[in-house]
Image (cartoon, rainbow, N blue to C red):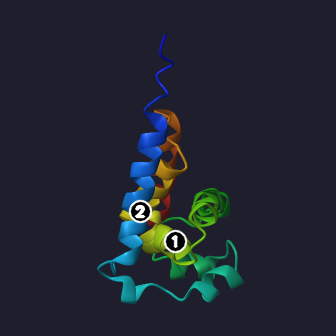
């Protein structure tokens, strides 16, 4: 009997290839990314919230939750730009979604919670 997970490695490799390709091609608006050092220097503060281009309600726990996804994604790819791209535009860039897929965070209720967190932060 098939466990249904036989296609999982292929799916993960496909997601990795797409994400790595995206990193090699300069994404539109990449020049507008805030410097990585500014984001790391003030974890989960209102000032960092402004750097992320979030216009909604500041919620430290939501910023921490979404930032952890980006940190895990950066560790997965071992490429420093991943962290900033993942958090770009208040976690609403295509890179955040790509990180969720790459980290195999695909459960509908978890993804819905992440989407709701982004919506709250963006306003």
Badge 2: residue crowd in 10 Å (few <14, some 14–19, many ≥20): some
Asked whether the beta carbons under mark 1 and mark 2 sit within 8 Å of each other, the answer is yes
Residue in the picture at 55% in, 49% down: 103
Residue in the picture at 45% in, 50% down: 13
Above or below, comparing residue 115 to residue 77 in the picture = above
Front residue of 55/27: it is: 27
Front residue of 78/39: it is: 78
Which residue lies most toward the top here? 1
Q: Which mark is residue 99?
A: none
Which of disc 2 and disc 1 is earlier in sequence? 2
Q: Considering the image in quadrants, where does the C terminus appear? A: bottom left
The residue wearing badge 2 is 19
Percent from the top left, x then y, of residue 72? 63, 59
Q: Tally the numbered discs.
A: 2
User: Taking 115 as reference, is 21 left or right?
Assistant: left
Percent from the top left, x then y, of residue 4? 46, 22
Give the spatial CA distance, label 1 vs label 2: 9 Å
Percent from the top left, x then y, of residue 48? 60, 79
Q: Can the viewer see residue 34?
A: yes
User: Taking 58 as reference, is 42 left or right?
Assistant: right
Label 1, secondary structure: give it. helix
The residue wearing badge 1 is 82
Q: Can the viewer see residue 116?
A: no
Residue 93, quarter of picture? bottom left
């Amino acid at each position: 009997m098939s466990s249904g997970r036989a296609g999982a490695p292929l799916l993960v490799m496909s997601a990795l290839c797409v994400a790595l390709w995206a990193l090699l091609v300069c994404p539109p608006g990449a020049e507008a990314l805030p410097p990585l050092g500014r984001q790391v220097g003030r974890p989960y503060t209102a000032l960092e919230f402004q750097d992320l281009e979030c216009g909604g309600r500041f919620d430290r726990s939501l910023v921490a939750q979404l930032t952890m996804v980006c940190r895990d994604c950066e560790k997965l790819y071992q490429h420093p730009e991943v962290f900033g791209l993942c958090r770009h535009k208040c976690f609403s860039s295509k890179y955040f979604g790509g990180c969720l897929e790459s980290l195999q965070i695909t459960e509908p209720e978890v993804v819905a919670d992440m989407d709701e967190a982004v919506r709250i932060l963006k306003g």
